[in-house]
Image (cartoon, coloured by chain):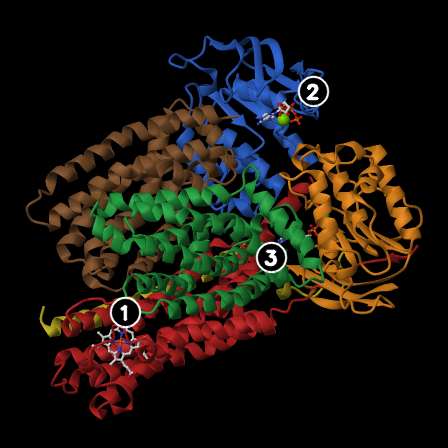
Chain colours: A red, B brown, C green, D yellow, E blue, F orange
Amino acid sequence: MSENSLAIRKFSDLANPTRFLALADRVLPWLAALTVLFFAAGLWLSFTTEGDYQQGETVRIMYVHVPSAWLSMMCYTVMAISALGTLVWRHPLADVSAKAAAPIGASFTFLALVTGSLWGKPMWGTWWVWDARLTSVFVLFLMYLGLMALNRAMEDPARSARVSAVLVLVGFVNIPIIKFSVEWWNTLHQPASVMRLGGPTIDPEFLWPLMIMAIAFTLLFFTLHIAAMRNEIWRRRVTSLRRQVARNAGRESLAP
Amino acid sequence: MMSLFFRDLKLSVRAGGGAMIGVLFFMTVVSVIPFGVGPDLNLLARIGPAILWIGALLASLLGLDRLFQAEREDGSLDLMLMQETPLILTVFVKCAAHWSASGLPLVVASPFLGLFMNMDELAIGATMLTLLAGTPAITFIGAVGAAVAVALPRGGLLVSILVLPLAIPVLIFGVSAVYAAVEDPAPFLPPLMILMAITLFFAVIGPLAAAAALRHSAD
Amino acid sequence: MMSLFFRDLKLSVRAGGGAMIGVLFFMTVVSVIPFGVGPDLNLLARIGPAILWIGALLASLLGLDRLFQAEREDGSLDLMLMQETPLILTVFVKCAAHWSASGLPLVVASPFLGLFMNMDELAIGATMLTLLAGTPAITFIGAVGAAVAVALPRGGLLVSILVLPLAIPVLIFGVSAVYAAVEDPAPFLPPLMILMAITLFFAVIGPLAAAAALRHSAD
Amino acid sequence: MSHAAYVFASYAVALAVVAGLVLWVVGDGRARQRELKALNAAGIRRRSAEAPIGEGK
Amino acid sequence: MRLLVEGLSARRGEDLIFNDISFSLAAGEALVVTGPNGSGKSTLLRVLAGLLQAETGKISLKDGPPGFEHPHELSHYLGHRNAMKRELTVEENLSFWRRFLGNSPGGSGIDLAAAAEAVGLAGITHLPFGYLSAGQQRRMAMAKLLVAYRPIWILDEPTAALDAGADRLFAGLVTSHLERGGIVIAATHQSLGIGQSKTLQMTGFSH
Amino acid sequence: MRLLVEGLSARRGEDLIFNDISFSLAAGEALVVTGPNGSGKSTLLRVLAGLLQAETGKISLKDGPPGFEHPHELSHYLGHRNAMKRELTVEENLSFWRRFLGNSPGGSGIDLAAAAEAVGLAGITHLPFGYLSAGQQRRMAMAKLLVAYRPIWILDEPTAALDAGADRLFAGLVTSHLERGGIVIAATHQSLGIGQSKTLQMTGFSH
Ligand code: HEM
Ligand SMILES: Nc1ncnc2c1ncn2[C@@H]1O[C@H](COP(=O)(O)OP(=O)(O)OP(=O)(O)O)[C@@H](O)[C@H]1O
Ligand SMILES: Nc1ncnc2c1ncn2[C@@H]1O[C@H](COP(=O)(O)OP(=O)(O)OP(=O)(O)O)[C@@H](O)[C@H]1O
Ligand SMILES: [Mg+2]
Ligand SMILES: [Mg+2]
C-alpha cells in the first residue's frame, strides 16, 4: 500500500496578463494622444479638400465610411487570429482579446452600414440594396452580435472561450466574401459612377484625407481594444475574487 | 408589483438574459428573407410589412417559453402562487416586463429592417405603430402557451405551435392596417382600432387563462 | 456506428422526441404566411419556394439545439468523447440520424405546403428536390451551433442566430435552383450542383468544427 | 435632404458611435477598478499576490 | 390565532399519499413532521401552502387577522428550492421578495442587512446569488423569511445542506419567531433543536 | 501493461484543483482515490479519462496494445451520470453501448443477459431505463462495463445510491476484473471492499 500525498503549491500563471496590464498602462496614453492627433489632421483635411464634381459634398462621407468598413473587417481578422491563439497556442490573453474586440467590431460595422446607407441615399436613391457587398457586411454585423450574445450567455469565460473561438473561425469565411464580393457576385452591383473612384485610380485629392483617417481609425481601434482588454482582465479578476469571498465566507462560519 | 416588473427587466438584461437574443433573432430572420425571395426591391417592399410582422411574431413567441419555466425551476413560482395578490395581476406584470424587455426592442428595431426591406417611410411608420399596438397581444397570448408548457422539458417550439394559431388574428389585422395605410382608398384607422381592441381583449383573457393554467400545473 | 444511427432514430420517434414537433412547426409557420401577405395567389406562388425554404431552415435549426445537449446531460457525450473512433464520425452519424428523423419529414411535408402556396407541380417538385439536397447542409452547419451551445442553459434561439448567417448560401442556391426550374431560360442544374457541393462541403466542415467545439466544451 | 445634410449626418453618427464606444470603455474600466478597490479594501487579494506558501494543508 | 387542519388527504397522480390528517396549532406552537423518504412530508406541506389541492379535508384559521380566507396567504413557504435568482445579487433578491411579499398584519420584516446578519452572512450580500455555495444559498433563503413578516412558517427540510453552526443559528431564528407568537411547521429528518414542539409522524402507505 | 501518471495538475476556471500527482499502476492493481467534498477526485478522474485537459503532466501507457496512444481509449469511465437514455429499454441501451464501444484488444465483453445477471437484475432488461429506481439504474450502468471489454476502469463514486447487497456484488465484479489483469481507478467515500489496493488521498487547496 503506498500513500501518495498531495500538496499544492500556490502559483499563478497570470504573470502574463499582469505584464499586459503594466504594458497597457504605459502604452495607452501615447496611443490615445496619437489617435486624437490623427483625427484632428484627418478631419481638417476631409473638410478642406475639394468636393468631387460628380458626387459633390457627399464624397466626404467616404472618409468615415471606408475606414470603418476596413476596420470592421480588420477587427474580425484580429478576432480570428485571437481564436487561433486560443485554440492552438492556448494563450491566456487570446480569449480576452477576442472577447474585447467583438463590441468594437460591431460598432465599426454598424458605422460602415449607416454611413454607407447615408451615402447610398443620395447616390443610388435608396438606403439599401441587397447587393453582395452590402449584404455580406450586414451578415458580418449579425455575426458580431451573435458572438456577443454567446459570450454573454456563458457564465464561465474559460469554457466560452474555446467554444466561441471555433465559431469565430467558422465565420471567418465571410471576410473574403466581403472583400471580393464586388468581383464575384455582380447581380446588383453599385453603379459605375461610384466605382470610378475604386482601387488605385483614386484621385490623390481624396487619397490623403482617406489615408489619414484610416490611420486614425486604426489607432482608435487599437486604443479601444487594449483598453477593453484591460477591462476584461479586471472583470475576470473581480469575478474570481468574488468567488473567493464567497468561499471564505462559508469557511469562516463553518468553524464556530 | 413594480418590484416584480423591475426584477424581470433586470433579469432579462443581465448576462444570459433573453432581451438581446429576441431582437437578434428578429433581425436575422427578417434579413434572411431577401436571400430567399431575391433582391427584387418592389417585391420586398410589397411583402415587407408582412415579413416584419411574421418575424416579430416568431421572435416574440420563441423567446416566451422561459417566462414561467425559470420561475418554476427555482421555486419562485410557488411563492407567487401563495400570495393574496391575485395571480392574474402577477402574470400581467410579468407579461408587461417581458414585453418591455423583448417586445419593445422589436418595435424599435423594425424601422431599420423596414429600410432593408425597401419600404417607404409611410409603411415603416405604420408598421411600427401596428407592432407597438399588436405585439403586447402576442405576449399575452404567448403567456398562455408558456403557462401550459411550464412543466415540459422542452417547451420552445411547442409553445409556438400551440400559440401561433391563436395569434393569427393579431397578424391579420396588424398587416392589413399597414397595407391600408399604404394603399390609399382603404382606411387605416378601423383595422388599427380592431388591433388595439384585440390587444385589450387578450390583456384580460391571456393573464386569466395563464393564471388558471399555472394554478393547475402546480405539483 | 450504425448502432448510433438507429439509437438516435429511435430516440426521436419515442415519446418526447422532436421529430414531429419540427414538422408541425414548419407547417404552422408556412401556413401563417398567407395570413400575413394576403391571399394574392400569384404573389404566393411567386414567393412560395422561398417561403418553403425559409420555413424548412427555421424548423431545422430550431429543433437542433438538443442534438448534443441531451447527450451531455445524461453523460453519454463523455463516453463518445473517449473513444478512439474519431469524434467527427460520431458527430456525422448523429447529424445523419437527426436529418433522417426531422429533415426528411420536412421534405416529405413540403409538397402539401406547396399546394397551399399555390405553387405549380414543377415548382413543387423542384422545391422538394432542392430541399432534399440542401437540408442536410443545414443540419451539418447547425451541428456546429448545437455543439457550441451544448453547455448553455437555453440554447434554442441562440443556436439559430449563430447559424443562420452561415446557412445563407444554402438558402440562396436552393431557392435560385427552384426559380431556375420554373423560369425557363435559367438552367436548373448548375445551382443544384452547387447546392450539393455546399452540402458535401459542410458535411466535412460541420462535423469537424462541431467535434472541435465539443472537445473544448467538456468539463 | 441636401447632400450636406447626409455628410453631416454621417459625421454625426460616426461621432456618436465613437463617443459611445469611448464612454463605454472608460466607464467600464472605472467600474471594474472601483470593484477591485472595494475588494482590496475588504482585504481580499489575489492568491498570486500573497506571499507564496510552500504547502497546502 | 389558531391553525386548524381537519381530515386532510392528498394524492399524487393516482396514489393516495396520506389520509385523514388532523391537527391544530396555536400561536407560538411548532409542528415537526417526520417520516421516511417518500412518506408524503413534502406533499403535506405543499397542501398546507395551498400549492396542491387537498383531496378531502379542510385547512382554516381561527382568530386570524380579518380579510384573509386562506392560511397560505399568511404563510412563508421554504421548499426544496430557494426561490432566488442566480443572476441577481443577494441584495437584489432579498429586496425584491421584501417588497413583493409585503408584511402580513401584526408584524414587520427586518431590513436586509439585519437579515443577512441574522443568518451569519453579513458581508456578502453584494455577490450574485449563483456564486454562493449550496449551504450559503440555503441560509440566504432563510433570510427571506425575516425580511417580510408572516405569522406562519412552512419549512421543508430547512436544514438540509447546512453545517452544525448554521443549524444552531436556524434553531434560534425559529425559537424567536415562536416566542413572538408565530406558528412553525417543519418537515425534517434531523432534530431541529427548538425545544418543545408537536410532532406528526408520517407513515406513508405500504404499497 | 502499466499506467503511468507523472506530475499531473489541473484547473477549473481560475482555480488550480490539484498539483503534481504521480502514480503508476501495473496490471491487476487498483487505486482508490479518497478525500473530502470538492477536493478534486472527480476532476482527477476526468483528466485521466481524457475529458479534461491537464494543466501540466503526462498520462501514458507502457507495454499496452499497439496502436493506442492515449490510455483513455482503453478505458471505461463511469461518472456521476449513467450515460443511458431514459426512453430506451435497458436492453436497447446496453446493446447500443456494446456495439458502439466495441472491445479493446485482449478481451471481449459478455453478452447482455449475462451482464444483467452479473449485476443481479436479470429479469428487467425489457423495461425502459427511466422506470428503474436510482439504485437499479446505477447497477445497469455497471453492466455497461461488462458488455464491452476495456482493460482500464475509471469509476467515480460507483457505489453511491447502492444498497449493501449491490456493494458486495460490485466488489466481486471489480475483483474479478483485477484478477484478469485489469486496472481499476475508483473515487469513493466508502470502502469498496476489494482487498489490497493503492490509495491516493486528495487534500484540495486551502484558500
Ligand atoms: C450600407 C451600404 C454600404 C456598405 C455595407 C458598404 C461596405 C463597404 C466595404 C466593406 C468597403 C471596403 C471594401 C474593401 O476594402 O475592399 C467599402 C468600400 C467603399 N465603399 Fe462602401 N458600402 C456601402 C455603401 C457605399 C456607397 C453608397 C458608396 C458610394 C456611393 C460606397 C463607396 C465605397 C467606396 C468608394 C469604397 C472604397 C473602395 C476601395 O477603394 O476599395 N459604399 N464599402
Ligand atoms: N411531482 C410528483 N408527481 C407525482 N408523484 C410525486 C411527485 N412528487 C412526489 N411524488 C410521490 O409522492 C410520494 C410522496 O412524496 P413526498 O415528496 O411528499 O415525500 P417526502 O416524505 O417529502 O420524502 P423525502 O423525505 O424524500 O423528501 C412519493 O411516493 C413520490 O413518489
Ligand atoms: N464544472 C465545473 N466548473 C468549475 N468548477 C468546478 C466544476 N466542477 C467542479 N468544480 C470545482 O472543482 C473543485 C473540485 O471538484 P470535484 O468535483 O473534482 O470534487 P470531488 O472531490 O469529486 O468532490 P465530491 O466528493 O463532492 O464529488 C470544486 O471546488 C468545485 O467547486
Ligand atoms: Mg420531501
Ligand atoms: Mg465527485
Q: Which residue is mark 3?
A: C93
User: From the Cβ of disc 2, is ligand 2 less than 8 Å away?
Assistant: yes
Q: In front: mark 2 or mark 1?
A: 1
Q: Which residue is mark 1?
A: C185
Please state which of residues E191 and A190 is positioned toward the viewer in this rendering: A190
Q: Residues within 10 Å of mark 1 (few under 14, many from 20)?
A: few
- Quarter of the image containing the N terminus of chain A? bottom right
Residue type pointed to by label 1: Pro
* For residue F4, side relative to residue B117 (left or right): right
Residue type pointed to by label 3: Val
Q: Residues within 10 Å of mark 2 (few under 14, many from 20)?
A: some
Residue at 63% x, 55% y is C219
User: From the Cβ of disc 1, is ligand 1 less than 8 Å away?
Assistant: no
Q: Name the residue at the left extreme.
A: B185
Chain containing the residue with disc 3: C
Chain containing the residue with disc 2: E
Residue F125's x, y, as percent?
74, 36
Q: Quadrant of residue E44?
A: top right
